[in-house]
Every structure is written in C-alpha cells, then in structure tokens.
Amino acid sequence: MASRVPSEVTTLVHDEEIHAECRAMAQVLDRIGDKWTVMVVGALSDGPQRFNTILRTVNGVSHRMLTLTLRGLERDGLVTRTVYPTIPPKVEYELTELGSSLIAPLRALAAWGRKNRPAIEEARLRFDERPETV
Amino acid sequence: MASRVPSEVTTLVHDEEIHAECRAMAQVLDRIGDKWTVMVVGALSDGPQRFNTILRTVNGVSHRMLTLTLRGLERDGLVTRTVYPTIPPKVEYELTELGSSLIAPLRALAAWGRKNRPAIEEARLRFDERPETV
DNA sequence: CCGTATCCGATAGGATACTG
DNA sequence: CAGTATCCTATCGGATACGG
C-alpha cells in the first residue's frame, strides 16, 4: 500500500463507489442468499402466519430450517414473533416495516426471473450441447 | 392428491400465483445466490474486463471460484467470453444484453441494503444482548 | 403446536500446484 | 495470462427424535 499519486485520485473515488456497492450487495446476499429466507418472506407478505402454516406454504422446507430461518429474520428485525401461551401453544410470525420494505426489490428480481427464464434455459442448452473442445 | 372440493378453488388460484412467485425466486437465487456472482456482474457493469482485472476488482475471490463463476454466467448467457489467441493469451468477459438487464434489479437490492444496514445492525445487537431465557 | 438437539451426507469454496 | 485438477475444510441443510 504505497502512497498514491495524484493522477489516480479520480479512479480511486470511482473504486470507492464500486466497493460501497459491493459491500452493500455482499451484506444483502448474506441476509437473503440462503435457501429459504426469501420464500419465508414471501409467505409472510400475505399477513401474519403461524409456524405450521408457513411450513406448509413454503414447499420443501424442513421443520428445522424453518425455525432457523425465522430466528435469523427475527434477529435482524425483519420479522416479529408473538407467542400466545395457550395450550397447545400458538406462535405467529409477522413482517415488520423493515421486512415489508424488502418485498418490492425482491419482486423486481422475481419478475426478472420470470421474464428471462426462457432465454436462460435456451442459452444453457446451447452451451451444454456444444462440442467438448472445438 | 385427492380430488379438490369446490370451496377451495379461489384459494387454489391464489396459491398458484404464490407458487409461481416462489419458483421464479428460487430460480433467481439459484442463479445469483452464491458468494461471487453478483460481485462479478457488478465488476463487469463497467464494461468488458480481463480475467485478472476482475480477479483484482472482486475483493477476496479465488482464482478457482472466479473461473467457475464466469463459466456459470457464460453458460446461462449472461456473459460472453472472448479469447484473443495472443501470447500471452488475453481473455475478455463482457455482459450480454441479458446480463446487463440484471443490473437494475440488483441495484435496487443493494440500495435497500445500504439504506437499512443501520436498522438491521441495531436490531441484531438488541436481539443478541437480550437475556438468555426471559 | 412449537422448539431444540443430534447425527450425517452433500456441496461450496479456499489453497496449491501444474499445463498451454 | 488463463484454465484445470487435487485436496481439504467448513458450512448448509435434511431426517429424526425428544422436550415443554
């Protein structure tokens, strides 16, 4: 890390911006990049849900992973957990303001996926069916 | 899969929509949910880049993972790979139209991250510092 | 009904060394 | 410079069983 020469300054500023973008994305992916988080958020976008309801809605999630996923979302303030001390117990999960604010950007991504799935699958076929070593 | 009763029909239609959303998201996460893909796309958003340039830009990525990440992006038609058969070899990667179209929704997510990082970190502290079992 | 613990396999991803 | 192969580890996540 030697001292910088003046001519690099503008580049450096640009790099800083890039790196800010990168750190933001790294953080977001750390939060939502796992297998179930966005599905759970999606399930909760309908309103408060009980544990077992989410379990049935989110296709394929295991009991264990749903617990962990919800715990993570609660920890980060995206979801609230409310226990009704009845017998049997009833626990409701609900998106916070913060959690709800994530839905819009998520939908944008999902829209991209729906729109471009055909193109991606076509590209994939072409790539896989091309000769081994041209 | 028993036959459905009529009273469930409207619910079913709604469920179908939910599941379409879910599958779209599952697909997108499968594509960009790994550790490096979005960073690489970000690096390429500046224009075509050589392998080693990307390697230096994307902080922390290993030689191996960059290769795999780029291969995946190429396979799905998000990136083109151009080899200039000079000595030493020069290989340039560039976003396709499809790849570029991913940048906007990605930026939306990054913006969400930058805006809400403080709130998330605060929530996390509160959660971690609360008594073990109230 | 909801949560946790234990066990276990699969895979992601880093380090390194070798090739053209 | 760019790509591949090998090895090794950490983590993710599923199945299951038990506890409150």
Image (cartoon, coloured by chain):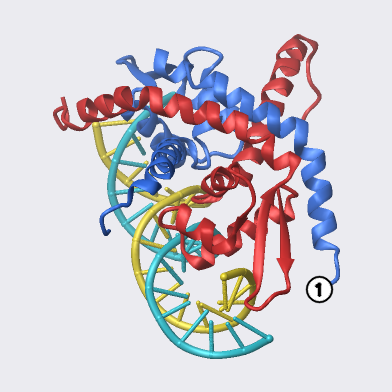
Chain colours: A blue, B red, C cyan, D yellow
Is the residue B114 above or below the residue A82 in the image? below
Q: Nearer the viewer, residue A61 or B92?
A: B92
Question: Could you tell me residue A15's position as x and y percent?
Answer: 42, 43
Q: Position of residue A39 (x, y in %)?
A: 56, 31
Image quarter of residue A105:
top right
Left or right of residue B70, residue C1 in this image: left
In this view of the protein, which residue sits in the foreground, B120 or B65?
B65
Task: Check disc 1 and report the residue beneath it.
Answer: A132
Q: Where is residue B83 in the image (x, y as percent from the top left)?
A: 72, 66
* Quadrant containing the N terminus of chain A in the rendered view: bottom left
Disc 1 secondary structure class? loop
Q: Mark 1 lies on which chain?
A: A
Residue depicted at 80% across the width and 59% down the height: A127
> Which residue: 15% across, 24% down?
B134
Q: How many marks?
A: 1
Q: In which quarter of the image is residue B7?
A: top right
Residue A26 shows in this picture: no
Quarter-wise, where is residue A81 in the image?
top left
- Using the image, determine if residue A47 lies above or below residue A18: above
The quadrant of the image that shows the C terminus of chain A is bottom right
Crowd band around label 1 with a 10 angstrom C-alpha radius: few (<14), some (14–19), many (20+) = few
Asked whether, in this view, residue B122 is left or right of residue A39, the answer is left
Q: Pick the residue in front: C18 or D6.
A: C18
At a point 47% along the width and 16% down the height, the residue shown is A100
Image coordinates for residue B92, horizontal then vertical, percent? 66, 59
Amino acid type at image mark 1: Glu
